Image (spheres, helix red, strand yellow):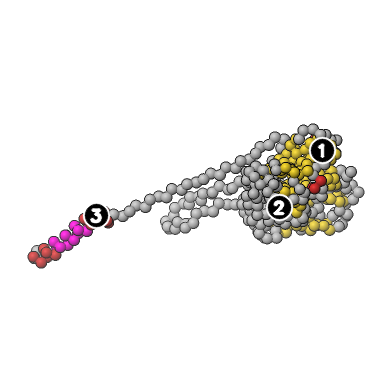
Amino acid sequence: MTRLSMRRFSWLGAAALLGLAACNFPGFQTAQPEEDSLATAAAQTVAAQLTQVAGTIGAPSPQPSETVAPLTTPSSTPVPSPTTSSTPSCTNQARFIRDVSIPDNTNIPAGNSFEKIWRLQNAGTCSWTSDYDLVFQSGNIMSGPPSSPLPGTVAPGTEVDIRVSLKAPSADGAHRGNWMLRSAAGVLFGIGANFDQPFFVQIVVGATATPQPAVVKDFVATYCSAAWVSGAGNLSCPGTDTDNQGFIIKLDAPKLENGITENEPALETHPQWIDNGVITGKFPAFEVKSGDRFRAVIGCLFNGLACNVRFQLNYRADGGALQNLQQWDQTYDGSIQSLDIDLSSLAGKSVEFVLAVLANGPASQDWAFWLAPRIVGPPR
């Protein structure tokens, strides 16, 4: 080896040693990334269990669990990894709110056309679209279409009026048609505990019609005949919506928390503006008869975001002690509740009914409403 070759070899060796030494200096070490820790907060829902409560408040629909994609069989051709995680499948569920038209056992002359309207809530996690259908399931189709598309998109938690044009059969008697919803994938679903039951239209043709319950007490029409009080004392009727002692006012076209503006009147009953405030209205005595029922829809008014209240239907029978018939908690969650309470246990008694609303904590936005509160029963 020549001297020049040896010199080149020495310089290359020295450079290699310097490179190895540099990799061990602190300034050249590669920093390891730290893992971020994720803190989760659990939210508790306090549900009041009440004595003498005959019904239960609709519970929120369960959220679907995440589905795990099955393993695939390895092949000789490499398969690229997915860039996005799998999306949980959604659920199709409906909840019946009320009959907007043609209540059960409505008498309709033979051959007459009519429009049946149900108000339903999307209680699942799938959005309903115009690819979803209203479909006839069983019973009497009453000249209706076997299926018809929904009017548009219905997001989870919102409500929609489902319409179908029908015609009364020619035969006398009761006629019932059962209907369900069908998803874009062709799967039928409906209402009930398992969301597999139909909703229906039932009419009566001819002289065998069942007499319709009459409104025998209208709480809206007579709301100022009641004695309204709060923790601050007696309240004026009608009140003003700025009264921090609490107020009662009538709303002719209330806009509800579900975004729907109703065509029936409601009573807004706001408790006193303090923590756990209250408002009550005691109505004049009313003689209850067998077959009487209390009906109303309750909830919070639109934009009452902090609304959290307890509704009570109380009574005093034949001058006795004040009793609670039923009570219900409501928050601003986009859903409302229909009430249909059997008053048979009070038949033959002179009853003072008391509508009450209590704040569950602060009362600043407790814009609580009773939509069309009334007692229906056999005509007097």
Q: Which residue is mark 1?
A: 351
Q: Do residues under tags 2 and 3 come within 8 Å of each other at their CB atoms?
A: no
Q: Position of residue 232 (x, y in %)?
A: 70, 43
Mark 3 crowd level (few <14, some 14–19, many ≥20, 10 Å Cα): few
Q: Is residue 118 left or right of residue 10?
A: right
Query: Could you tell me residue 134's position as x and y percent?
Result: 72, 55
Between label 1 and label 2, give the one nearer the viewer: 2
Between the C-alphas of marks 2 and 3, the distance is 74 Å
**Which amino acid is tagged 2?**
Asp
In this view of the protein, which residue sits in the foreground, 366 or 40?
A: 366
Q: Nearer the viewer, mark 2 or mark 3?
A: 2
- Which residue in the structure is indicated by mark 2? 241
Residue range corresponding to the magenta coloring? 9-19
Which residue type carries mark 1? Val
Q: Position of residue 87 (x, y in %)?
A: 54, 53
Q: Amino acid at mark 3?
A: Phe
Mark 1 and mark 3 residues within 8 Å of each other at the beta carbon = no
Q: Which residue is mark 3?
A: 25
Viewer-side residue, 338 vs 9: 338
Q: Secondary structure at mark 3?
A: loop
Spatial CA distance of label 1 from label 3 is 91 Å
Q: Earlier in the sequence, mark 1 or mark 2?
A: 2
